[in-house]
Image: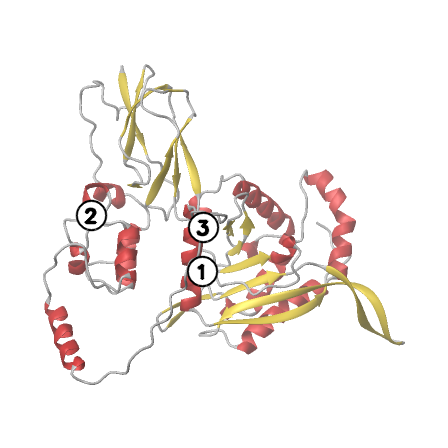
């Protein structure tokens, strides 16, 4: 009998670790090739890890909720099949441990990680980047207790430390010179009378016997944290435009049957909206930016995220990369592919990363408009409302007339730190112009 070491697979260029959320197979279970052994999750995407061989699961090396590095051995499968040279031939031999440092060294992109982390303690790339962004030195990082395997510091440990005011680390820590200076300054400051800050009243939670308490799932917690962080980070402003999209609606009605027959898939309004957005970004590139302190980072690529509803009720935002380089047919196929795999929980982690602008369709829920929250670190998000037939005034050569038109609202929320009303309003107006001036004779 040979023993096969099942590794946590690579899940994308920017993904270094994942959380085990469920073991589908238990020790002693027989496994067929391509059977799902466990389910894992990154920040937004849930994935399944299949077995590349048939055999029997003999050992799980991590528990549920453990955070595991890409490339680490996560399970041992006993098999009669021919296996790669990385296996151990004797069941009694210990499993060779994978060095976390070696794993991270082989992950593309980690050569760009912040320098200065020369500690013997291992930190994931995500933890290092958070520490740099929050101004936490490697020395302070070494004092924070970790709840991961062998005391490893996880992302949640660091975020809890930051949320608690970076005050009380769970372990006793030496006071560094800088901290001593800060302590002295605080003592001197305490001698000066300070204004009394009013305490915000705590909302009471009254629960009766008829109420149902529902625990947030992992994705809902992440969404909640991300939304609160966005509102705390960016001063949100929303501009609205009403657009007459009659030509666009009539054109789609004209081509949709032939398109579905030819391509074996449907054409929705979403790729049309995406095309208009990408064209408007070309016209107003300062919408396609992010903020880093006092720096504005102007993005070269136009990567548009599209918010998609999941069967669980949560939202996920797959990203169409280089949307401006795709024609309408390419956008349609990309939209249908990503939306379908999002609903089936088949997205890859990289497919939700590196977006530069987001589109959300509140009209799919029957809403006429919305004030969406910016998907950080982006600076703008566009909501498209439901298309409604309404009476509208049309200017003609023979005078004004009232006609039934297909109308919709577009609403753009933007970060007022870097996007002023003139830019935000002009951008959303330009998107509407592209939709209103749709060519009825266009071919796809």
Q: Say which quarter of the image contains residue 337.
A: top right
Estimate how packed mark 2 is, as few (under 14), some (14 to 19) or many (20 or more) residues with alpha carbons within 10 Å.
some
Dots 3, 1 in contact, CB < 8 A: no
**Drawn side of residue 155 relative to residue 382, left or right:** left
Q: Residue at x 31, y 45 (%)?
A: 107
Residue lying at the far right in this picture: please name it. Answer: 398
Residue 441 visible in the picture: no
- Relative vertical location of residue 83 with respect to residue 161 in this rendering, above or below: above
Q: CA distance from mark 1 to mark 2?
A: 30 Å
Front of the two marks 1 and 2: 1
Q: Which mark is residue 324?
A: none
* Earlier-in-chain disc, 1 versus 2: 2
SS state under label 2 = loop
**Drawn side of residue 110 relative to residue 220, left or right:** left
Q: CA distance from mark 3 to mark 1?
A: 10 Å
Q: How was this image coloured?
A: secondary structure
Which residue is labeled 1 in the image? 227
Image quadrant holding the N terminus, namely top left
SS state under label 1 = helix
Count of numbered circles on the image:
3
* Earlier-in-chain disc, 2 versus 3: 2
Which residue is labeled 2 in the image? 122
Which residue is labeled 3 in the image? 220
Q: Residue at x 68, y 69 (%)?
A: 242
Task: Where is residue 102? Give x, y as percent.
Answer: 22, 41
* Earlier-in-chain disc, 3 versus 1: 3
Residue 315 visible in the picture: yes
């Amino acid at each position: 009998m040979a023993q096969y070491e099942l590794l946590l697979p690579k899940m994308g260029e920017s993904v270094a670790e994942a959380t085990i959320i469920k073991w589908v197979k238990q020790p002693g279970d027989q496994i067929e090739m391509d059977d799902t052994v466990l389910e894992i999750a990154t920040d937004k995407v849930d994935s399944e890890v299949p077995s590349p061989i048939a055999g029997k699961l003999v050992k799980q090396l991590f528990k549920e909720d453990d955070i595991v590095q890409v490339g680490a051995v996560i399970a041992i499968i006993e098999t009669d099949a021919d296996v790669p040279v990385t296996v151990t031939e004797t069941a009694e031999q210990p499993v060779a441990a994978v060095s976390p440092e070696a794993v991270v060294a082989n992950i593309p992109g980690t050569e760009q990680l912040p320098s200065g982390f020369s500690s013997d303690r291992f930190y994931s790339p995500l933890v290092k980047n958070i520490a740099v962004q929050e101004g936490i030195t490697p020395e302070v990082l070494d004092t924070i207790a970790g709840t991961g395997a062998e005391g490893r510091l996880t992302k949640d440990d660091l975020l809890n430390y930051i949320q608690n005011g970076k005050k009380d680390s769970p372990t006793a820590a030496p006071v560094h010179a800088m901290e001593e200076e800060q302590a002295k300054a605080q003592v001197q400051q305490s001698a000066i009378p300070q204004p009394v800050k009013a305490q915000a009243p705590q909302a009471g939670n009254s629960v009766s016997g008829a109420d149902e308490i529902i625990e947030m799932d992992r994705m809902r917690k992440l969404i909640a944290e991300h939304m609160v962080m966005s509102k705390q980070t960016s001063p949100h402003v929303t501009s609205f435009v009403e657009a007459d999209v009659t030509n666009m609606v009539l054109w789609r009605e004209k081509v949709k049957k032939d398109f579905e027959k030819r391509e074996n898939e449907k054409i929705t309004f979403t790729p049309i909206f995406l095309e208009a957005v990408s064209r408007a970004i070309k016209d107003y590139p300062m919408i396609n930016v992010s903020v880093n302190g006092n720096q504005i980072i102007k993005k070269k690529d136009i990567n548009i995220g599209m918010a998609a509803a999941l069967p669980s009720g949560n939202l996920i935002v797959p990203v169409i990369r280089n949307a401006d380089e795709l024609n309408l047919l390419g956008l349609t196929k990309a939209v249908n592919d990503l939306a379908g795999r999002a609903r089936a929980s088949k997205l890859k982690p990289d497919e939700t990363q590196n977006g530069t602008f987001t589109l959300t369709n509140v009209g799919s829920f029957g809403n006429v408009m919305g004030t969406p929250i910016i998907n950080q670190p982006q600076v703008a998000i566009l909501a498209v409302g439901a298309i409604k037939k309404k009476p509208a005034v049309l200017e003609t050569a023979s005078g004004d007339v009232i006609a039934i038109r297909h109308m919709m609202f577009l609403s753009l929320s933007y970060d007022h730190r870097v996007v002023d009303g003139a830019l935000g309003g002009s951008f959303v107006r330009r998107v509407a112009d592209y939709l209103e001036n749709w060519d009825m004779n266009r071919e796809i």
